[in-house]
């Protein structure tokens, strides 16, 4: 059985880009008769707030998106909040460390800032780490450990990563793409890369449907799945939404980008769902429609492979009932 999920980070209000990804992920699972999971990726407690988590849940339900497992629905793989699953990440970290996949990194932020002009290995991850601490001797590590608490990096194996994305097609990343990446920060917090792999495997996800901004995180996650001897799910990355200026949606594009503000303006959920379905290629005009009415219309082939630029009239339409 297909199992999919929507896994937002409750560090701000749900915007229409989040809502579109949630809707498409939900439609894929519902059309296949599978199980849909809502997971809150709130591992960074400094950024994530309960008020945003509650608002996210209410916004999704308002749009007609429900879930079989998650907050308010329980399920066999609870808890569904990352902040309550840290012991699972620690077990995975210990396994990787014991099997020799990790090494301590003593680089300071100021050292890494010097890499800002270096070639970027992965767009979403910044400059490729050049392996400064990878080959330190035991004695060198002892000396550096007296000066700084280390983070821990995953040592990339010397092999390329290839996968077929459900929307973006064949993807190939040469060996070493992005450089060795952090799996545990110096302050003890586990990285997104490790947490998401542990959670998706632990919750038996068969399909990972998310925004294309995470496309180039996928090779790192595939390597973690393989290192932990976990099954690798299918990946589907949907291109992002952009404002009329061709830049990623943000507050600069007005109040209509958040579901909370759209609801406050008295707009009906069917109108929002219809616009999201239209820009995603599921229907031929932006007419009001319920989420459940789109299940039969869903097809990955229809979804644009390029970012969608929202016109100003369309944004304005979301500001008025």
Image (tube, rainbow, N blue to C red):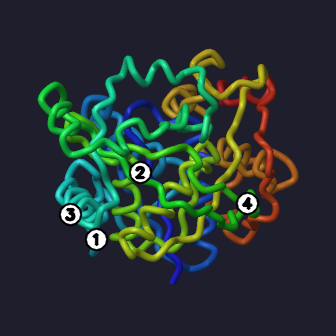
Label 3 to label 1: alpha-carbon separation? 16 Å
Residue 300 in the image, given as x and y percentages of width and height = 74, 65
Of mark 1 and mark 2, the one earlier in the sequence is 1
Of mark 1 and mark 4, the one earlier in the sequence is 1
Of mark 3 and mark 2, the one earlier in the sequence is 3
**Mark whose residue sits in front, 1 or 4:** 4
Label 1 to label 4: alpha-carbon separation? 28 Å
In the image, which disc is placed on residue 91?
3
Which residue is labeled 2 in the image?
193
Disc 3, SS: helix
**Mark whose residue sits in front, 4 or 3:** 3
In the foreground, 94 or 210: 94
Disc 2, SS: helix
Above or below, 280 against 251 in this view is below
In the foreground, 270 or 303: 303
**Mark whose residue sits in front, 2 or 4:** 2
Which residue is labeled 1 in the image?
77
């Amino acid at each position: 059985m297909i199992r999919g999920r929507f896994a937002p980070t409750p560090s701000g209000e749900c915007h229409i880009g989040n809502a579109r990804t949630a809707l498409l992920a939900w439609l894929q699972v519902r059309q296949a008769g599978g199980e849909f999971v809502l997971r809150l990726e709130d591992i960074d407690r400094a950024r994530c707030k309960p008020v945003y988590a509650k608002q996210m849940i209410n916004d999704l339900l308002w749009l007609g998106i429900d879930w079989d497992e998650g907050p308010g629905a329980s399920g066999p793989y609870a808890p569904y909040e990352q902040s309550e699953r840290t012991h699972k990440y620690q077990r995975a970290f210990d396994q990787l460390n014991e099997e020799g996949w990790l090494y301590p990194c003593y680089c300071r932020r100021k050292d890494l800032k010097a890499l800002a002009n270096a070639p970027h290995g992965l767009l979403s991850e910044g400059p490729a780490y050049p392996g400064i601490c990878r080959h330190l001797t035991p004695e060198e590590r002892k000396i550096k450990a007296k000066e700084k608490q280390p983070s821990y990096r995953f040592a990339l194996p010397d092999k390329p990563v290839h996968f077929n994305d459900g929307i973006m097609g064949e993807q190939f990343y040469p060996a070493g793409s992005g450089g060795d990446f952090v799996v545990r920060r110096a302050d003890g917090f586990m990285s997104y890369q490790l947490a998401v792999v542990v959670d998706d495997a632990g919750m038996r996800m068969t399909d990972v449907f998310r925004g294309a901004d995470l496309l180039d995180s996928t090779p790192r996650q595939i390597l973690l799945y393989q290192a932990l001897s976990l099954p690798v799910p299918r990946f589907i990355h949907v291109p992002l939404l952009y404002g009329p200026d061709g830049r990623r949606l943000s507050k600069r594009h007005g109040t209509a980008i958040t579901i909370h503000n759209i609801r406050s303006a008295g707009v009906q959920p069917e109108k929002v769902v219809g616009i999201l379905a239209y820009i995603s290629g599921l229907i031929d005009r932006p007419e009001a429609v319920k989420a459940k009415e789109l299940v039969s219309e869903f097809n990955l082939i229809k979804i644009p492979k390029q970012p969608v630029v929202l016109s100003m009239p369309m944004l304005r339409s979301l500001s008025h009932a």
